[in-house]
Amino acid sequence: MSFSLLVLNTIFILTLPFLFFAFILPNLARYIKRGRKTFFERFYLKARNLKKGGIVIFSSSVGEGKIAIHLARTLRKTTRKSIYALVETPEAKKILKKSSVFDNCFLAPVDIFFVVKSFFKKLKPSLLILIELGIWPNLIEVASKTSKIVIVNGRISRRSFPRYRIFKFFIKKLFKNISLICVRTQTDARRFVKLGAEERKVFITGNLKYDLMFSNIEKHEIPIKKEGKKIIVAGSTHRGEEEAVVDAVLNLKRDDVFCVIAPRHIERADEVKALLQKRGISALLLSEYKNRHKKNPQTLVNFLVVDKMGYLMDFYRIADICFVGGSLIPHGGQNFLEAIFLKKPVCVGKYNDNFKFEFEFFKDDIYISQTPQNLKRIFEKIFENPENADMKAKRAYEKLKTLTGKTERYLSLLEEFL
């Protein structure tokens, strides 16, 4: 273990009591609910007889997991090495495993030196690919002893950058272990260099998510049909946004509107349903709707809450309006490209720092709600002039096509590490 990493681990251990009471304890119920079945997987890798010299792709969220799937499928065409996935969340693991593109999928180890070391002693990859960033000090330090490390689709948000700068001394040392950094934009490149990355290692290669839009997307059967309804889908919503969506839908005072709410974190689905019921609104979860709909096809509800992963694109397909969350509140926005790919009228809030380039690029062809109260007026505007909404959606789709073709660029840079 290097001296800097020893210092960082010591600081972490000393601050652990504070971290526990400040961050872990208030969210303990959520952590237990999400991780009770997977806790020990993060400390011990059960799998044995794994092929040495393979490729490990590390991703955090479901969104990054989809990039990992696309990347793995592409790599399969150029290498015969084993490809393994490390993921941060159980939801992402399910999706990656279901793709059948990886030789195996594992939950990422907790970033404790001896735990990570035990994982990599079994994996022994020749290449570790980090999606977007993922500054896990022990993971990078341990992997660097036997593997080349590259970052793909690299990004550092405006919000994260000041926090990373506090630890620049440590991050700079970690970057020395990384052989290649492929970033989305010029801004991302500057931020990586300011944090200590060597300029010769940083390449601007664009966003792989654009190519992902045009790859094979799995479809699921959903239990609702349009049947004359106007469907509003609120995707990737955060706490505080569901109320705004519900207010906007109710204030439309239309009997033909059906609203689907898909919270960003599906463990909040019961919370969102309770919020609706507290206001006297009939609502069902997707899991309940399937069962109830089969028993009684005449059952009608005006609100459906999605409590299953991987269904958002299916609901976007039948939507008349797609509202994409994380943007009405100062969160930084969520990915609205999927709705654009499906040629749907897209509405977002004004907070889109996480997708600053995309927001600026598409802002003339999407609807922007400056306040939660303005959401209702935008919904009305789309319903009153569907021809204009359709024209904007098609224009946005054509713009999206101009951003594709990044995969080949990534492959050319990764070739020497395969």
Image (spheres, grey):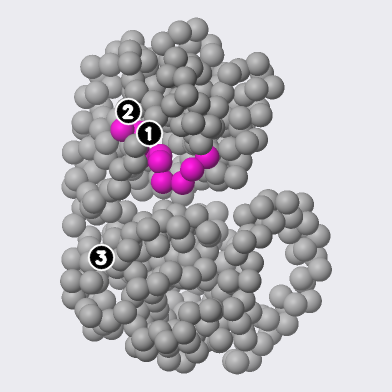
Q: Position of residue 99 (x, y in %)?
A: 33, 59
Residue at point 37%, 33% (across, down): 222
Q: Is residue 314 magenta?
A: yes
Q: Is residue 7 magenta?
A: no
Q: Nearer the viewer, mark 1 or mark 3?
A: 1
Q: Disc 2 residue type?
A: Ile
Q: Residue 382, can we see it?
A: no
Q: Nearer the viewer, residue 145 or 368?
A: 145
The residue labelled by disc 3 is 73
Residue at point 24%, 75% (across, down): 413
Q: Helix, strand or loop at disc 2?
A: helix
Residue range of the region highlighted in magenta in the rendering: 307-318
Q: Disc 3 residue type?
A: Arg
Choose the circle earlier in sequence order: 2 or 1: 1
Q: Disc 1 residue type?
A: Ile
Instruction: Decide: is 181 above or below 251.
Output: below
Contact flag, marks 2 and 1 (Cβ < 8 Å): yes
Q: Helix, strand or loop at disc 3?
A: helix
Q: Helix, strand or loop at disc 1?
A: loop
The residue labelled by disc 1 is 222
The residue labelled by disc 2 is 318
Q: Position of residue 373 (x, y in %)?
A: 55, 20
Spatial CA span between label 3 and label 2:
28 Å
Residue at point 61%, 82% (across, down): 115
Residue at point 59%, 78% (across, down): 44
Choose the circle earlier in sequence order: 1 or 3: 3
Spatial CA span between label 1 and label 3:
27 Å
Q: Nearer the viewer, mark 2 or mark 1?
A: 1
Q: Position of residue 95 (x, y in %)?
A: 41, 56
Spatial CA span between label 2 and label 1:
10 Å
Q: Determine which quarter of the picture holds residue 197.
A: bottom left
